[in-house]
Image (cartoon, grey):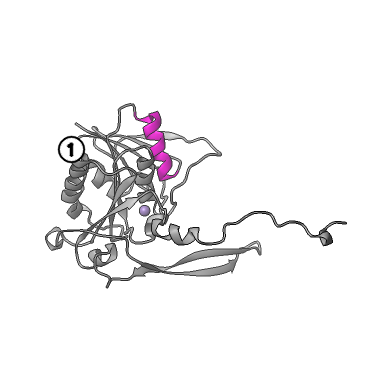
Amino acid sequence: MPNILVSNDDGIFAPGLRTLAEAMLALGDAWVVAPKDNQSASGHRKTMHRPLRATPVGQVFSPRIKAYAVDGAPSDCVALALMGLVEEDIDIVVAGVNSGPNLGQDVTYSGTVSVTLEAAIFNLPAVAFSLDSRHPDADYRPTVDFLQSITRQVLANGLPHHTILNVNFPAIPRKEIRGVRITQQGRRVYRDVLTSRTDPFGQPYYWIAGAEPEGDIETEGTDIWAIYRGFVSVTPIHLDLTRHEFMPALRNWNWDTTPELSTSEDTP
Ligand code: MN
């Protein structure tokens, strides 16, 4: 029976986390180590300048699941679990199910995806799951079959080194889901605006927020394209962000850093 670590960025009480953790019990044993509060869009980060506290959580999950709430980032939860908070050897890390999609450039902000990137650093296979709805009453049940079948396949086949799967679900009934598409990252269009106001003490403050991001739904084969058409999107993501095909051209720039000989005008 595999040992499965479950985390998220929406916090320990998020309904999508409960759906994912309980779904994993059909495959093996599950541990939940998740942030105590909402850490969405917190990216891949490490808490270094203060201690971390992990509080055992009962009653939220079935008795078979041992759960901890952590006062750190999603990536902290993974490191903490894998470095000793969970005493068993973990076989796979799963994240989510996130409230809201993680498409295109979202993956660089995503705490859900950063759970899996941290797992990749520990050389473990990992899958990030997200639902294309932020509604508090969103229905996560249509995702359960896919949570189990995708995790089963990753356990059976493994993943290439430093590679994770980013899975997004359309928020539609199970019978309307048209299947799975293997996709590449699409292009997000963010609609944030900068709001500046003055606080009661006369000091300025700023808020960066706006309407839901949009995206290019026309380019076939992208994550955004697939979700828009009712498919489950599965994107392999590599921890190596190197733009390999740009390296030859970059080498041709002028990298000669030999100091120029000082002229007589420089000498006092
Ligand atoms: Mn989130």
Magenta stretch contains residue 78: yes
Whether residue 250 is visible: yes
Task: Tally the numbered discs.
Answer: 1
The span shown in magenta is 73-86
Depicted 75 relative to depicted 201: above or below: above
Q: Is residue 96 visible?
A: no
Residue at image point 44% right, 48% down:
44
Image coordinates for residue 55, horizontal then vertical, percent: 40, 34
On screen, 66 above or below 117?
A: above
Residue 138: % across, % down: 26, 58
Residue at horizontal 62%, vertical 55%? 257
Q: Main secondary structure of the magenta part?
A: helix
Q: Amino acid at mark 1?
A: Leu
Asked if residue 81 is among those painted magenta in the image, a careful observer would answer: yes
**The quadrant where residue 65 appears:** top left
Instruction: Tell which residue pokes out farthest to the left in this image.
Output: 175
- The residue located at (35%, 41%) in the rendering is 119
In the rendered view, does 88 fall on the left or right side of 206? Answer: left
Query: Which residue is situated farthest in the top direction here?
Result: 87
x, y percent for residue 15: 28, 49
Which of 106 and 221 lies nearest the eye of the viewer? Answer: 221
Instruction: Give coordinates of residue 29: x percent, y percent.
Output: 23, 33
Q: For the residue labelled by badge 1, is the local secondary structure a helix, a strand or a loop?
A: loop
Q: Is mark 1 within 8 Å of ligand 1?
A: no
Residue at image mark 1: 27
* Quarter of the figure with the N terminus: top left
Answer few, some or many: residues within 10 Å of disc 1's Cα (few below 14, many 20 plus, some between 14 and 19): some
Q: Quadrant of the C terminus?
A: bottom right
Q: Nearer the viewer, residue 129 or 23?
A: 129
Residue found at the far bottom of this picture: 218
Q: Nearer the viewer, residue 177 or 10?
A: 177
